[in-house]
């Protein structure tokens, strides 16, 4: 008996209709979606201008009820009496409590100070008590003015002419925008300047997310007319709860 010929194969089945299997199609769709998501995440809104950043940083600091500060330095002359470092708390309207390291004729002494409303009291080493005194005796001006909107650190943010953004830098896990410009030496608060007629190089670092002024770096002839020294003020703990009173009033 002769065999009947097989009918021609139907090539219009699933494999002919789609070059991809269902699982493969799902993978491709997922990759496309991820690509679109990554593209959206990679695009960021433009940074604010340097002028706007400075304005917002000043407004944020000026609105803070209190801050913690740390002061460091380098290149400070060891002759005479000069401010070396410090740490403490600042509270509005004009209060400060902390400790300053002061170089006195080559020796460094830590001096506890409290300043409220223009009255400055210090505890000298080995004395065990506070006395009303002049901050100039320790190589500084009244530190309580650091938070003053017109005489303090934020007043320096208004002195930039045509400022431009510098490189971003990371400090303690925080990404900050930086700006650098020159200011008159006479405008610097707290730190005495032996040659205020010379300009001072100022660099500020600002958090562009919450607009907190984080660091202020000052380079100028603060302790020597012939060489520059550097002071760095770091601000943190905005709106911390502190109560500062004069020791003589307690």
Image (cartoon, grey):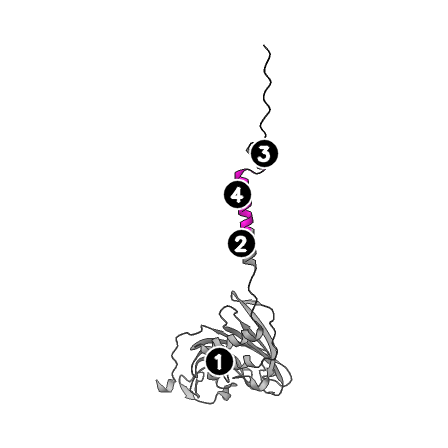
Q: Residue 186 — which label?
A: none
- Residue farthest to the right, as pictured: 226
Q: What residue lies at 53% left-to-right and 50% top-to-bottom?
A: 33
Reading the chain from its start, which is encountered first: label 3 or label 2?
Answer: 3
Quick one: quadrant of the C terminus? Answer: bottom left
- Which structural element holds mark 4? helix
**What's the CA distance linking mark 1 and mark 4?**
66 Å
Is residue 66 something one can see in this rendering? yes
- Residue farthest to the left, as pictured: 250
Reading the chain from its start, which is encountered first: label 1 or label 4?
Answer: 4
Q: Is residue 21 above or below residue 197?
A: above
| Structural crowding at the residue carrying mark 1, measured as other residues with C-alpha within 10 Å and reported as few (<14), some (14–19) or many (≥20) | many
What range of the chain is rendered magenta?
Answer: 15-34
Depth check: 158 or 226 in front?
158
**What's the CA distance linking mark 3 and mark 4?**
18 Å
**What's the CA distance linking mark 3 and mark 1?**
83 Å
Q: Residue 16 — which label?
A: 3
From the image, tell me which residue sits under label 2. Answer: 37
From the image, tell me which residue sits under label 1. Answer: 100
- Which structural element holds mark 2? helix
From the image, tell me which residue sits under label 4. Answer: 26
């Amino acid at each position: 008996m002769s065999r009947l010929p097989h009918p021609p194969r139907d090539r219009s089945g699933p494999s002919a209709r789609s070059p991809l299997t269902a699982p493969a199609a799902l993978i491709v769709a997922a990759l496309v979606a991820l690509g679109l998501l990554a593209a959206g995440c990679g695009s960021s809104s433009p940074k604010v201008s340097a002028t706007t950043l400075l304005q917002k940083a000043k407004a944020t600091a000026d609105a803070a009820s209190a801050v913690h500060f740390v002061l460091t330095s380098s290149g400070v002359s060891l002759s005479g009496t000069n401010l070396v470092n410090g740490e403490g708390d600042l509270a509005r309207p004009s209060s400060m409590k902390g400790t300053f390291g002061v170089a006195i004729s080559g020796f460094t002494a830590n001096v506890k100070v409290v300043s409220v409303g223009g009255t400055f009291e210090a505890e000298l080493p080995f004395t065990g008590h506070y006395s009303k005194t002049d901050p100039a005796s320790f190589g500084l001006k009244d530190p309580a003015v650091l938070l003053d909107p017109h005489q303090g650190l934020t007043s320096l943010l208004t002195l930039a002419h045509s400022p431009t953004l510098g490189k971003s830098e990371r400090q303690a896990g925080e990404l900050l925008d930086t700006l650098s410009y020159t200011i008159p030496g006479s405008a610097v608060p707290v730190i005495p300047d032996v040659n205020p007629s010379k300009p001072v190089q100022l660099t500020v670092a600002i958090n562009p997310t919450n607009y907190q002024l984080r660091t202020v770096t000052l380079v100028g002839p603060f302790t020597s007319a012939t060489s520059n020294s550097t002071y760095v003020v770091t601000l943190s703990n905005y709106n911390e709860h502190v109560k500062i009173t004069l020791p003589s009033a307690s």
